[in-house]
Image (spheres, helix red, strand yellow):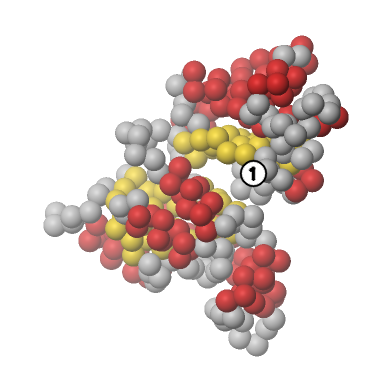
Amino acid sequence: MKVTVVTGLSGAGRSVAAGALEDLGWFVIDNLPVSLVPKVAELATSATANYDRVALVMAGYDGEMAQQVDELRRTLDNVTVIFLEASTKVLVRRYKLTRRRHPLSDGTSLTDAIEEERTRLIAAREAADLVIDTSDLNVHQLRDRLTSAFPDDGLEGTMRVAVSSFGFKHGMPLDVDLVLDCRFLPNPHWEDDLRALSGKDPEVREYVLERELTERFLDRLNGLLDELLPAYADEGKSFLSIAFGCTGGRHRSVAVAESVAAQLKDRGWLPRVSHRDIDR
C-alpha cells in the first residue's frame, strides 16, 4: 500500500493534483478532513482493501495535520507528503480570476488571509517530502511534475532525483534542495552564432563544457554528488531536486544540467531533467 498526502496553500493547485493522481491510477479522496485521516488509514490497511495506491488531498490550518501525518507514517511503510505553495502575488491573482472566497478571508483582506494560512501551514510544509512551488506552473506543467514524481518504473523505495535549469533574471526557484550558480562560466550569449541556440545544442554544449574551468567544476561537483545522494537516500529522503542557474536560463545552466543528469544516470540514478526558462 502506497499513500500520498497532498496538501498546501489554498489556490496552489490541490484540485489539479488530485486529477493528475487519479489519471495515474491512484484512488483519490479529495477534500478529506484532517480528523478522518486515522479512519482512512485503518480502512486502507484492512484485509478487505482493494487499493494499492491511495491519495489523500486535504487542507489543514493547524498543527493537527502534522500530527496526523506522523501517525500515518507510523502506521504505514510507504507514505509520501506533497506540499503545494505559490507566491502571495500569484495566489491573489488566481483568487481574483476565479472570484472564489479564501477559506480564511472572513473580516480580513485576501492578502492577510493568504499570509495567515501560510503561517498556519508551516508545520505541514516541514513534514513534506516534496514541496512544489506552482507560481510559474500552468495546469499541464503541474501535472507533468506530479507524473514525473511517480513514474511507473519499478523503482519503489528509490530516491527520485530532479535536475533543472533556470535563469536568475526570471527569479530563483523556491522548491529545490540544492542550487548552483553557473554564471562564472563563459557566456555563449555574447557569441553571435550561439545566441539563438540553447544549451541542448551541440555547439553551445561544446562552448560551455569543453573548457578547463567547466571540467574542473563538473569533476568536483560529481564527486560531491556521489557523497551526497546516497547520504540523502539513507536518511529516508524521497525526492532530491538540484537546480543550476545562469543569467537567462538558456545556455550555461542548460548545458551543465544535461551533463550532470547524464553523469547521474551513469551512476545508477534516473534523474528527471527540466529547463524552466529555456524558451524565454
Question: x%, y% of residue 84?
Answer: 54, 58
Q: Is residue 59 above or below residue 46?
A: below
Give the camera-side residue of 254 and 104: 254
- Residue at coordinates 68% horizontally, 83% vertically from top-left? 108
Q: Residues within 10 Å of mark 1 (few under 14, many from 20)?
A: some
The residue labelled by disc 1 is 276
Q: Is residue 270 left or right of residue 257?
A: left
Asked whether residue 98 appears in the rendered view, the answer is yes
Quadrant containing the C terminus is top right
Question: x%, y% of residue 227?
Answer: 57, 22
- Residue at coordinates 18% horizontally, 56% vertically from top-left? 49
Q: Secondary structure at mark 1?
A: loop
Which image quadrant for residue 30? bottom left
Residue at far right of view: 190
Which image quadrant for residue 41? bottom left
Amino acid type, callout 1: Arg
Residue at far bottom of view: 107
- Residue at coordinates 14% horizontally, 54% vertically from top-left? 47
- Residue at coordinates 18% horizontally, 55% vertically from top-left? 50
Q: Is residue 5 left or right of residue 95?
A: left
Q: Is residue 81 above or below residue 203?
A: below
